[in-house]
Image (tube, rainbow, N blue to C red):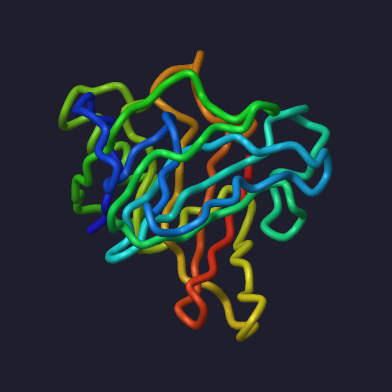
Amino acid sequence: MIKLLIYSPKPVELNATSFGGKPVKNISENFSWPKCACCELPMQFLGKIKVEDDIHQIFMCQNDPGVCDDGEPDDGGNAVIVIKPNELEYVTIPAEGETLRKTEYSAVIIEVDAPNYAEAVDVWGESNNQEYRRVLGQTSGEPYWLQGDDTPNCDTCHKPMTFITQLEQGPKYETEMNFAGGSGYSFACSCNRSAKFLWQC
Protein backbone atom coordinates (compact mmCIF):
# COMPACT_ATOMS: atom_id res chain seq x y z
CA MET A 1 0.00 0.00 0.00
CA ILE A 2 1.22 3.49 -0.88
CA LYS A 3 0.40 6.26 1.59
CA LEU A 4 -0.41 9.36 -0.46
CA LEU A 5 -0.51 12.86 0.98
CA ILE A 6 -3.67 14.47 -0.40
CA TYR A 7 -4.54 18.17 -0.28
CA SER A 8 -7.12 19.08 2.36
CA PRO A 9 -8.88 22.43 2.92
CA LYS A 10 -9.38 21.69 6.62
CA PRO A 11 -7.87 24.18 9.11
CA VAL A 12 -4.16 23.81 9.76
CA GLU A 13 -3.23 22.31 13.14
CA LEU A 14 0.02 23.13 14.91
CA ASN A 15 0.86 19.45 15.54
CA ALA A 16 -0.19 17.99 12.18
CA THR A 17 1.16 17.77 8.63
CA SER A 18 0.66 21.04 6.75
CA PHE A 19 2.33 23.22 4.14
CA GLY A 20 3.00 26.94 3.97
CA GLY A 21 2.09 29.12 6.89
CA LYS A 22 4.51 29.47 9.79
CA PRO A 23 6.80 26.96 11.49
CA VAL A 24 6.24 26.02 15.12
CA LYS A 25 8.36 25.40 18.19
CA ASN A 26 8.05 24.00 21.68
CA ILE A 27 7.13 26.75 24.12
CA SER A 28 9.95 25.74 26.46
CA GLU A 29 12.67 25.55 23.79
CA ASN A 30 14.60 28.09 21.77
CA PHE A 31 14.19 28.13 18.01
CA SER A 32 16.86 29.24 15.57
CA TRP A 33 15.53 29.92 12.06
CA PRO A 34 17.91 28.15 9.65
CA LYS A 35 20.02 30.31 7.38
CA CYS A 36 21.41 29.44 3.94
CA ALA A 37 25.13 28.66 3.92
CA CYS A 38 25.45 30.38 0.53
CA CYS A 39 23.66 33.73 0.91
CA GLU A 40 23.54 33.68 4.74
CA LEU A 41 19.88 34.78 4.75
CA PRO A 42 16.98 32.93 6.43
CA MET A 43 15.52 30.09 4.36
CA GLN A 44 11.90 29.72 3.30
CA PHE A 45 9.62 27.48 5.37
CA LEU A 46 8.04 24.84 3.11
CA GLY A 47 5.95 22.83 5.55
CA LYS A 48 5.90 20.34 8.38
CA ILE A 49 5.44 16.56 8.34
CA LYS A 50 4.07 14.63 11.33
CA VAL A 51 6.22 11.50 11.69
CA GLU A 52 5.11 9.27 14.59
CA ASP A 53 6.19 11.22 17.72
CA ASP A 54 8.07 13.96 15.85
CA ILE A 55 7.41 16.89 13.56
CA HIS A 56 9.83 17.41 10.68
CA GLN A 57 9.92 21.04 9.50
CA ILE A 58 11.43 21.60 6.07
CA PHE A 59 13.21 24.78 4.97
CA MET A 60 14.83 25.69 1.63
CA CYS A 61 16.57 28.85 0.46
CA GLN A 62 14.53 30.96 -1.97
CA ASN A 63 16.32 34.27 -1.61
CA ASP A 64 17.91 34.00 -5.04
CA PRO A 65 16.45 30.88 -6.72
CA GLY A 66 18.92 29.05 -8.92
CA VAL A 67 21.98 30.60 -7.27
CA CYS A 68 22.17 29.03 -3.80
CA ASP A 69 22.78 25.27 -3.50
CA ASP A 70 19.29 24.29 -2.30
CA GLY A 71 18.91 20.90 -4.03
CA GLU A 72 21.52 18.77 -2.24
CA PRO A 73 21.28 17.46 1.34
CA ASP A 74 24.72 18.64 2.52
CA ASP A 75 25.35 21.92 0.69
CA GLY A 76 23.66 24.21 3.21
CA GLY A 77 20.78 25.48 1.07
CA ASN A 78 18.07 23.53 2.87
CA ALA A 79 17.40 22.16 6.34
CA VAL A 80 15.07 19.92 8.33
CA ILE A 81 14.38 20.72 11.97
CA VAL A 82 12.93 17.88 14.06
CA ILE A 83 10.90 18.73 17.17
CA LYS A 84 8.47 17.03 19.54
CA PRO A 85 4.80 18.03 19.05
CA ASN A 86 4.32 19.21 22.64
CA GLU A 87 3.14 22.66 23.78
CA LEU A 88 3.60 24.26 20.40
CA GLU A 89 3.44 27.87 19.32
CA TYR A 90 4.25 29.72 16.10
CA VAL A 91 7.74 31.17 15.85
CA THR A 92 8.73 34.77 15.23
CA ILE A 93 9.36 35.47 11.54
CA PRO A 94 12.78 36.95 10.61
CA ALA A 95 12.75 40.52 9.35
CA GLU A 96 14.89 39.68 6.30
CA GLY A 97 14.87 37.00 3.63
CA GLU A 98 12.21 35.19 1.60
CA THR A 99 10.88 33.18 4.53
CA LEU A 100 7.17 32.38 3.98
CA ARG A 101 5.10 30.96 1.12
CA LYS A 102 1.90 32.77 0.19
CA THR A 103 -0.33 29.84 1.08
CA GLU A 104 -1.27 27.43 3.84
CA TYR A 105 -3.03 24.07 3.56
CA SER A 106 -3.32 20.70 5.25
CA ALA A 107 -2.91 17.13 4.07
CA VAL A 108 -4.59 13.81 4.78
CA ILE A 109 -3.12 10.34 4.22
CA ILE A 110 -4.94 8.10 1.74
CA GLU A 111 -3.74 4.51 1.27
CA VAL A 112 -3.75 3.25 -2.32
CA ASP A 113 -3.09 -0.32 -3.44
CA ALA A 114 -0.38 0.09 -6.09
CA PRO A 115 3.17 -1.22 -6.68
CA ASN A 116 4.83 2.22 -6.53
CA TYR A 117 4.19 5.91 -5.98
CA ALA A 118 3.72 6.90 -9.63
CA GLU A 119 1.09 4.24 -10.20
CA ALA A 120 -0.62 5.10 -6.92
CA VAL A 121 -1.00 8.70 -8.10
CA ASP A 122 -2.60 7.49 -11.35
CA VAL A 123 -4.94 5.10 -9.54
CA TRP A 124 -6.07 7.74 -7.07
CA GLY A 125 -6.60 10.41 -9.72
CA GLU A 126 -8.58 8.17 -12.05
CA SER A 127 -10.72 6.52 -9.35
CA ASN A 128 -11.60 9.83 -7.69
CA ASN A 129 -11.81 12.00 -10.82
CA GLN A 130 -9.52 14.52 -9.16
CA GLU A 131 -6.72 16.77 -10.37
CA TYR A 132 -3.30 15.20 -9.89
CA ARG A 133 -2.07 18.41 -8.27
CA ARG A 134 -4.12 17.48 -5.20
CA VAL A 135 -1.55 14.74 -4.59
CA LEU A 136 1.06 16.43 -2.41
CA GLY A 137 3.41 13.46 -2.20
CA GLN A 138 3.77 10.26 -0.20
CA THR A 139 4.95 9.25 3.24
CA SER A 140 6.93 6.19 4.41
CA GLY A 141 7.45 3.30 1.98
CA GLU A 142 10.04 3.80 -0.77
CA PRO A 143 11.00 6.98 -2.65
CA TYR A 144 10.16 7.19 -6.34
CA TRP A 145 13.38 8.64 -7.71
CA LEU A 146 13.40 10.84 -10.80
CA GLN A 147 17.19 10.62 -11.33
CA GLY A 148 18.33 7.50 -9.50
CA ASP A 149 18.83 6.64 -5.85
CA ASP A 150 20.28 9.59 -3.96
CA THR A 151 19.66 8.45 -0.37
CA PRO A 152 21.86 10.52 1.97
CA ASN A 153 23.98 9.03 4.75
CA CYS A 154 23.77 10.06 8.39
CA ASP A 155 26.64 12.30 9.51
CA THR A 156 26.91 10.39 12.79
CA CYS A 157 26.55 6.66 12.05
CA HIS A 158 27.33 7.06 8.30
CA LYS A 159 24.55 4.62 7.38
CA PRO A 160 21.84 5.34 4.74
CA MET A 161 19.05 7.38 6.26
CA THR A 162 15.41 6.27 6.43
CA PHE A 163 12.97 7.65 3.86
CA ILE A 164 10.35 9.93 5.42
CA THR A 165 8.41 11.68 2.68
CA GLN A 166 8.36 12.63 -0.99
CA LEU A 167 6.81 15.98 -1.88
CA GLU A 168 5.31 17.48 -5.01
CA GLN A 169 5.44 21.22 -5.56
CA GLY A 170 1.88 21.92 -4.44
CA PRO A 171 -1.75 22.24 -5.55
CA LYS A 172 -1.40 25.64 -7.27
CA TYR A 173 1.22 26.93 -9.67
CA GLU A 174 1.15 30.42 -8.13
CA THR A 175 2.16 29.24 -4.66
CA GLU A 176 4.03 25.99 -5.31
CA MET A 177 7.37 24.97 -3.83
CA ASN A 178 10.34 25.34 -6.15
CA PHE A 179 11.73 21.92 -7.06
CA ALA A 180 12.27 22.95 -10.70
CA GLY A 181 9.29 20.84 -11.70
CA GLY A 182 10.50 17.80 -9.75
CA SER A 183 10.03 16.28 -6.31
CA GLY A 184 11.49 16.84 -2.86
CA TYR A 185 12.65 14.02 -0.57
CA SER A 186 13.26 13.99 3.18
CA PHE A 187 15.15 11.41 5.24
CA ALA A 188 15.96 10.86 8.91
CA CYS A 189 18.16 8.72 11.13
CA SER A 190 17.10 7.22 14.46
CA CYS A 191 20.61 7.28 15.89
CA ASN A 192 20.45 11.01 16.60
CA ARG A 193 17.04 12.20 15.26
CA SER A 194 18.81 14.07 12.47
CA ALA A 195 17.14 14.71 9.11
CA LYS A 196 18.08 15.80 5.61
CA PHE A 197 16.30 17.07 2.49
CA LEU A 198 17.01 17.13 -1.25
CA TRP A 199 15.16 17.48 -4.53
CA GLN A 200 15.41 16.05 -8.03
CA CYS A 201 13.88 17.08 -11.34
- Residue 175's x, y, as percent? 49, 19
Residue at x-position 54% and y-position 64%:
195
Quarter of the C terminus within the rendering = top right
Compared to 188, does 135 lie above or below?
above
Is 20 on the left-hand or right-hand side of 105?
right
Name the quadrant containing residue 179.
Answer: top right
* Residue sitting farthest toward the front: 28
Is 2 on the left-hand or right-hand side of 183?
left
- Residue 106's x, y, as percent? 28, 33
Quarter of the N terminus within the rendering = bottom left
Front-most of residues 145 and 92: 92
- Residue 8's x, y, as percent? 23, 29
* Residue sitting farthest toward the bottom: 157
* Residue sitting farthest toward the left: 128
* Residue sitting farthest toward the top: 174
Compared to 18, does 145 lie above or below?
below
Compared to 75, does 42 lie above or below?
above
Front-most of residues 155 and 84: 84
Count of marks, rendered view = 0
Is 123 on the left-hand or right-hand side of 18?
left
Front-most of residues 110 and 37: 37
Residue at x-position 29% and y-position 42%:
14
Residue at x-position 47% and y-position 53%:
144
Residue at x-position 42% and y-position 21%:
103
Compared to 126, does 167 lie above or below?
below
